[in-house]
Image (cartoon, helix red, strand yellow):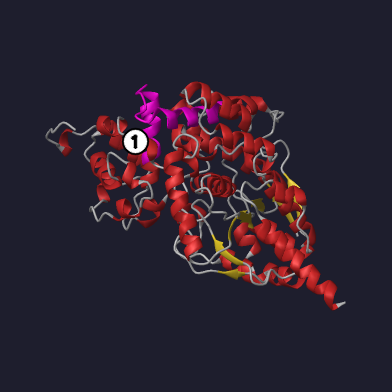
Amino acid sequence: MVDKPICPTASRGKFLQKLQQREIDVQACFQCGRCSAGCPVAEYFDLSVMAVVRLAAYGEEERLLHSRTIWLCAACETCASRCPNGIEIAGLMDILRELACRKGITAAEPRVAAFHQAFLASVGRWGRVYEMGMIASYKLHSGDLTGDLPLGLRMVARGRLRMLPEPIAERSAVAEIFAGKGREYER
Amino acid sequence: MKLSYYPGCSLKGSAADYDDSLHRLCAHLDIDLVELVDWNCCGASSAHMLNHEAGMRLAMRTLQQAAGIGHDLLVPCAACFQRLKAADRALRRDAEYWDEPDYSPAWQVIHISSLLAAPELLARIKKAVSRPLTGLKLACYYGCLSLRPPKVTAAENWEQPDTLERLVAAIGAEPVRWSHRTECCSGSLTMARPDIAERLVADIVAAAARAGAEALVTDCPMCQANVESRQPAGTGLPVFYSSELAEAAISGSYPSRQRRAHLVDPGVLSRLLATAQAVEGGAR
């Protein structure tokens, strides 16, 4: 990581405004470290949870958007539940992932991003997740073609993977949601 | 009792056995489940992770449907429950922002754990049990999303929950005291980073085994699949659904299609029921 001076006053106002809109008060952090201490995946992170909150307070958006941490966060909500200052840290991770995607930044953990995209594509198409199709699409996009093949076969043998999708009737309602209905005010 | 029912995608797919056992359990308890018509996916983890707007609106469509019926909405999947509660909270706080100014439901979104652990229902379950699962040592595993964050889930006891322990005791089994009841199994990462899931699940099953558990019991379909599929070879700790065990204790039987869905041999339950039957047969 390149050393560079951090200056809160020169921070990205737009990013902080976004956090404010979602009522995520990163400035309330007094760095007690409870979030990092309870994180089940902390050992795989490049930035600790507490560092994410601090960097967000400094508006250090770019560093956060390129981190592996935002993709390896499992959204278990332990950090947010334990924060003594009530900071919705898992919600902060959501905002960072969404921003990274919108800005077209290559995810530092591309397979994780590919999984979420395959999941949402399935929901967008059928209205519900078609697990078999979602897995196939994830495999193709992530390049992880053979991983978990034995497990997949066991799931099929145990009747746990449906062969065909079960589309909903009102797929147009779901398509509208994904097309951004309601984004008129730049939510 | 009549409840609206939102099964969610898992219960119509990889966790169809959960849906099945829940329906049979509710039939024993005179709970009438009215499945929402043409429900859509709640978006689960992926939608709120990449697209806040879609995550909220997918869940809100379901809430609209439930509002049209007016019963409490039963949600067995922890992930769906958390997403529906998050959307419900957003609507209750600012219905106009989400273009649903009339949203003020008198009904609630309820997770299966709080339904089954309510004193009145617990008493009914206890009364209905025909074959108590005496001696079966179970590690109650809650995972994350039915509890956290408490602001959203409204869970009363998110660090030290006891709803599963109360249910397990009511069906005559023995809940063990152990450390990892609310630890994350990283279900949302299991496909993309199986190495992380294997590590977390190994810790969880090791802790359960250390406490003397013969199996785990959960009410989250992601935890069920993840903890069974990612545990180290040879561990052999099956993960049961709470509804599966309660139904078995009430009916005294364990259907083969239920058994078949497990990725880890659930023989500990079939053997227990067989023994109970043999003892009873011998006494006759």
Q: Count all numbered tags in the image, as a single digit.
A: 1
The quadrant of the image that shows the N terminus of chain A is: top left
Left or right of B227 on screen, residue B173: right
Could you say where residue B227 lies in the image, as x and y percent from the top left?
53, 49
Left or right of B140 on screen, residue B38: right
The quadrant of the image that shows the C terminus of chain A is: top left
Could you say where residue B7 lies in the image, as x and y percent from the top left?
67, 45
Q: Nearer the viewer, residue A139 or B165?
A: A139
User: At 64% across and 58% down in the image, what residue appears?
Assistant: B242
Q: Is residue A118 visible?
A: yes
Q: Nearer the viewer, residue A18 or A141?
A: A141
- Quickly name the residue at label 1: A18
Q: Is residue B129 visible?
A: no
User: At 75% across and 52% down in the image, what residue appears?
Assistant: B23
Left or right of A42 on screen, residue B1: right
Q: Quadrant of residue A154?
A: top right
Could you say whether the residue bearing mark 1 is in a helix, strand or loop? helix
The outermost residue toward the right is B284
- The overriding secondary structure of the stretch rendered in magenta is helix
Establish if B60 lies above or below B120.
Answer: above
Could you say where residue A61 lies in the image, as x and y percent from the top left?
27, 32
Could you say where residue B41 lies in the image, as x and y percent from the top left?
61, 36
Establish if B135 lies above or below A154.
Answer: below
- Looking at the rendering, the stretch of residues picked out in magenta corresponds to A93-121
> Within the magenta stretch, is there residue A96?
yes
Q: Nearer the viewer, residue B28 or B216?
A: B216
Looking at the picture, which amino acid does disc 1 mark? Lys
Establish if B134 lies above or below A151.
Answer: below
The outermost residue toward the bottom is B283
Chain containing the residue with disc 1: A
Left or right of A1 on screen, residue B198: right
